[in-house]
């Protein structure tokens, strides 16, 4: 399954113990899901984490984020659907999701409602994605 992770999922997954966002990061590392990113989105991850974390915490998280980004599939943005979201920063996520044909995973479903309705973009919360992954793994067993 290909996914585009909103910055809030990256932040939670890399900074908080347990929870659905952390499981999603782990699922990326073991190959259960393929994270897709654009150049702009990867820069946003770095920008947000480096600004919101203490310098010491950022230095701890930086190698993990780097590994995640090295494993990610980089998506060229050939077409933009802007503006689609009330939050201009979320338009980068939408552009990546649409160009990748991937599911967007976010804690902030509200800002993606218009994209889901008008573009047919699949948008899930981290918990919904974990439930979906669990069900698909059970079917394979």
Image (tube, helix red, strand yellow):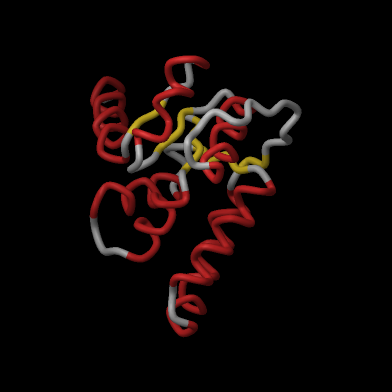
Q: Position of residue 56 (x, y in %)?
A: 46, 84
Considering only vertical position in the picture, is 100 above or below 67? above
Question: In the displayed structure, does residue 78 sit left or right of residue 6?
Answer: right
Question: In the displayed structure, does residue 134 sit left or right of residue 100?
Answer: left
- Which image quarter: residue 79? top right
Considering only vertical position in the picture, is 52 above or below 12? below
- Residue drawn at 43 percent across, 31 percent down: 112
**Nearest to the observer: residue 27 or residue 60:** 60
Considering only vertical position in the picture, is 48 above or below 25? below
Question: In the displayed structure, does residue 30 sit left or right of residue 125?
Answer: right
- Residue drawn at 44 percent across, 74 percent down: 53
Q: Position of residue 51 (x, y in %)?
A: 51, 71
Which quadrant of the rendered structure holds the C terminus? top left
**Nearest to the observer: residue 50 or residue 141:** 50
Q: Tell me how many marks there are.
A: 0
**Nearest to the observer: residue 128 or residue 63:** 128
- Residue drawn at 58 percent across, 55 percent down: 44
Considering only vertical position in the picture, is 88 above or below 52? above
Q: Position of residue 73 (x, y in %)?
A: 63, 40
- Residue drawn at 40 percent across, 62 percent down: 14
Question: In the displayed structure, does residue 63 sit left or right of residue 20?
Answer: right
**Nearest to the observer: residue 27 or residue 91:** 91
Q: Position of residue 86 (x, y in %)?
A: 47, 36
Extreme residue toward the bottom, this view: 56
């Amino acid at each position: 399954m290909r996914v585009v992770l909103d910055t809030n999922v990256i932040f939670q997954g890399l900074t908080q113990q347990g929870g659905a966002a952390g499981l999603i990061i782990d699922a990326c590392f073991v190959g259960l899901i393929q994270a897709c990113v654009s150049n702009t989105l990867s820069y946003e991850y770095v920008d947000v984490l480096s600004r919101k974390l203490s310098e010491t915490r950022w230095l701890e998280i930086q190698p993990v984020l780097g590994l995640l980004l090295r494993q990610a599939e980089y998506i060229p943005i050939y077409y933009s659907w802007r503006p689609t979201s009330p939050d201009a920063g979320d338009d980068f996520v939408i552009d990546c999701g649409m160009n990748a044909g991937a599911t967007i995973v976010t804690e902030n479903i509200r800002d993606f409602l218009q994209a889901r309705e008008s573009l047919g973009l699949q948008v899930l919360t981290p918990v919904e994605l974990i439930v979906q992954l669990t069900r698909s793994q059970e079917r394979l067993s």
